Amino acid sequence: MLQLIEQVKQTMPLDDPETFACGPKGDCIGCPKKLLELVDSEMRYWESAIERGERPLLGELSRFAKLCRNVHRGLARSGTLERYQATQTKRSDESHN
């Protein structure tokens, strides 16, 4: 579960403020803000539960993975992931120069 959480943190724009702003035209495909809030709340729940010593069952791990896959697909369809990755690449290039 911790590996999955780490992978989610690396691939999804959970801390990107642009992702959490609704567009002025309301032309979103799926709501990236709501999708990411759902993943973030589940992720925080499991981080807290694991810190308390709870161990996720296989079914719980499977449901979280399925949620993440579906959200990832929705973010890719709306172009959110592509914009986020382009921003990350640009920031990485700027920090190396």
Image (cartoon, rainbow, N blue to C red):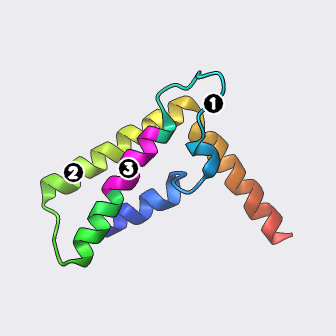
* Mark 3 or 1: the one toward you: 1
For the point 70% across and 47% down, the residue is 86
The answer to which of 66 and 41 lies nearer the viewer is 41
The residue under label 2 is: 62
The boundaries of the magenta stretch are 34-42
Task: Please name the amino acid that badge 2 sits on.
Answer: Ser
**Quadrant in the picture for the N terminus:** bottom left
Q: Residue furthest right?
A: 97
Task: Please name the amino acid that badge 1 sits on.
Answer: Gly
The residue under label 3 is: 39
Q: Earlier in the sequence, mark 3 or mark 1?
A: 1
For the point 82% across and 63% down, the residue is 94
Circle number at residue 23 = 1
Q: Earlier in the sequence, mark 3 or mark 2?
A: 3
Q: Position of residue 35 (x, y in %)?
A: 42, 40
Task: Please name the amino acid that badge 3 sits on.
Answer: Val
Res. 72 in view: no
- Overall secondary structure of the magenta stretch? helix
Relative to 72, 59 lies left or right: left
Q: Is residue 8 above or below residue 82?
A: below
Q: CA distance from mark 3 to mark 1?
A: 20 Å
Relative to 67, 82 lies left or right: right
